[in-house]
Amino acid sequence: MKVVVCVKQIPDPADPGALDPETKTLRRNVKLILDESDSYGVEMALQLVDAAGEGSVHLVSMVPNDEVSGLRTALAMGADSATLISDEALAGSDALGTSRVLAAAIERAEPDLVLAATESSDGYTGVVPAQVAELLGLPSVTFAKEIAVEGSTATVRRQTEAGADLVECPLPAVVSVTAGVVEPRYPSFRGIMQAKNKPVDQLKIADLGIAAERVGWAGAGQEITDVAEAPERAAGEVVVDEGDAHERIVAFLDELKVI
Amino acid sequence: MTLDKIWVFCEAGDDGVATITLEMLAKAREVAGTVEVFCGGDGAACAAELGDHGVTAVYATGDLDGRMKGVSVASAVAAAISDGSVAAPDAFLLGTTYDGRDVAARLSVKLDVSVLSNVVDLRLDGDRLVGVEPVFGGTLNVTSRFTSGGPDIWLVRPKSFEPEAVGGSPAEVVDLPVPDLGSTGGAVVRDRFTEESEGPKLDEAAIVVSGGRGLGAADAYAMIEGLAKQLGAAPGASRAIVDAGWVPYSYQVGQTGKVVKPTVYIACGISGATQHLVGMKGSKNIIAINKDSEAPIFAVADLGIVGDVHKVLPKLTEALESR
C-alpha cells in the first residue's frame, strides 16, 4: 500500500513572523518547521502501512524556497521518501493554487491513499484536502478520527456536529485527519540519521506541467486590500491566589448574575 | 448598491436550521437583494424557518442516501449552473463547518474560483464584497477580496453575525438534482453516531470552562467537567490537550477549533497561545487561572488569578456547590 501524506513546512507558531508596516505584507523570512498538525497524518500513514504489512509512505510538500528541514522531521519519523515542489513562483499561492500543485505531484506518485491534516496551522483555510480530491477525481473523507484499510476499502470514523459518521470509501481516496487521534512518534536518533539519506525529489512547477500564472500571487483569485491591527482587549484585575482566590471568582460570577 | 443574489449553504439538524446558517442569512440580506439557500437534504422541513429569515427559495438535493454532502452538493450546484437551470449568484456563503468546508472546496475546483476562509465580517466595497479574516491570534485583521470573475466563495466563521428573523412567507422549495458523481462519489455513510453530552453545546453555552496543559495530566480534566457541570457550562479545551489526546477534537476552542462567545469564559491552565485566543477573545467576560503570571491569557482576562488550577478549581467547585 502506498500512502502519500501532504505536509506543510510553516513558520514556528511560537515565532510566526510579523507584519511589515510599509508593505502591509507578512514578513516570513523565518525558519520553517513541520506543521505539528501534519505529524498526525504521518503517524497515521506509518501505522496503516505497518498494519498492512507492506507498503511505503511518501511525502508531498511545496514551498517557495528550498527549505527541507520540516520534511526531514517527517522522514525521520519513518516516511520513506518525499517530493518537494520548490519554486519561487509559488509565493502567494491561494488554496486552489496550492491544491493544483499538490494534486499534480500526488498523481505522479500513484498512491492508494492520500492523507492530509484538516487544515494547516498558519493559513488554516481548511479546503485543500477536498480540493485535491476534486482535482484528482477522487472521493474524500474529511475530519477523520480513525482510519482502517482492508483490501481496497477504507473505513473512516468522521467527526460531525452531532458525533461521528462511519464512512466506507473505496481507494484511492483523500482523507484528512484531525489532530490528537494518534500519538506521533518522536524521531529516533537512528531515524534522524537515516532521514538525511532518504530521497527528496525536488521539482519546479514546470516539471509538473503547471504554468506560473496558475499559482502564486499571479494565480491567486484573491488579494489583500488592507491589514490592520485588531482592537485590543484590555486586561482587567489580576489577583495572586493566597488560598482564597476562588472567593473572588464567585463574587465576579455573582456580579455578572450568572450563578 | 447591493449585490443581486447570494446563495447561503443551509445546514440543519433535528432542532431546525443551524445557527451558523441563520447568522449568514442576516448578513446576506444586508448586502444582497435576493437571498436563497442551497442544501444537501430535505428542503421542505426548513422552508418556513428560512422564509422567516428572508429566504425566498431553498434549492435542495433531497435525501442523499448516505452519499457525502460535500461532493454531492457541490456537484449539484455546479451542474445546475452549467446547464443553465439556475443563474450563478454573485457570492456563496458557507459556514466554516465540517460539511461547509467540503462543499466550498469542491465547488471552487468545479467553478475554478478561489475560496476565502475564516472571514468574520463581510461588507460591500463598491459592487464587490470584501471580507475580514483575523490572523496571528486575532491581533491583525486582514481584509481581502476576490479578483477572479466570480462567483465569490466565502467561508464564514460561526458567531460572526447575529441571526435576525424578519418575518416572511415560507421559502419556495426547488429541486437541486445531484448528478452522477462518478469516481468522486464512492464514499458512503454506513452508520451515524450521536455523542450524548449532558450539558449545553460548546458554541451555544452561556458559560464555557476550558482546560489546558496546565492541568498536567488527562485525568485532571475531570476538574473542568466538574466545574462545568456545577455552572451549567460547556467544557472546552485548548489545542494542546486535544493534540495530546486528553479530550476529543470537538472540545477544541481556537483557530482550528470552535469559536465561542459566551457570557463568561473560564480558562484554566491555558497559557493563551494565539491559536487559542482567536477562538475565545470575543467572550463577554474572561476569567483566567494560570500559575505563570506572565501568561498571555492574562492580557485578555477581565479577572486573572495567578495560581495553581489544582488548588483553585476544587475550592471553586466546592464553594459553588455549597451555595
Image: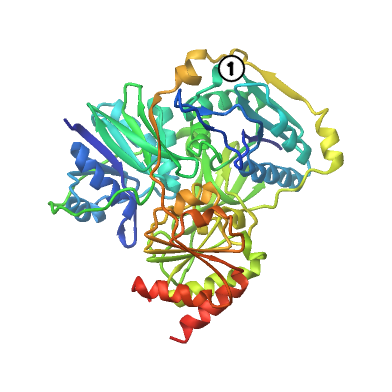
Q: Nearer the viewer, residue A13 or B152?
A: A13
Q: Secondary structure at mark 1?
A: helix
In the figure, is residue A255 to the left or right of A216? left
Q: Nearer the viewer, residue A235 or B261?
A: A235
Q: Which residue is found at the position 67% from the left and 52% from the top?
A: A182
| Towards the viewer: A250 or A186 | A250
Q: Chain of mark 1?
A: A
Residue A248 lies, with reference to residue B51, above or below; the image says below
Count of marks overlaid on the render: 1
Q: How far from the left and from the top, in percent, is residue B248?
A: 56, 59
Q: Position of residue B141 (x, y in %)?
A: 40, 38
Residue A150 in sight here? yes
- The quadrant of the rendering that contains the N terminus of chain B is top left
Quadrant including the C terminus of chain B: bottom left
Q: Quadrant of residue B179?
A: top left
Q: Position of residue A30 (x, y in %)?
A: 63, 30
Q: What residue appears at the point 56 percent right and 74 percent down from the top-left corner? A: B313
Nearer the observer, A174 or B228: B228
Q: How is the image coloured?
A: rainbow
Instruction: Answer above or below: position of A44 versus B125.
Output: below
Q: Is residue B60 left or right of residue A69?
A: left
Near mark 1 (Cα within 10 A), the count class, few <14, some 14-19 or many ≥20, is: some
Residue A56 makes an appearance in the image? no
**In this image, B83 relative to A240: left or right?**
left
Residue wearing tag 1: A88
The answer to whether A35 appears left or right of A201 in the picture is left
Give the residue type at disc 1: Glu
Residue B226: % across, % down: 53, 75
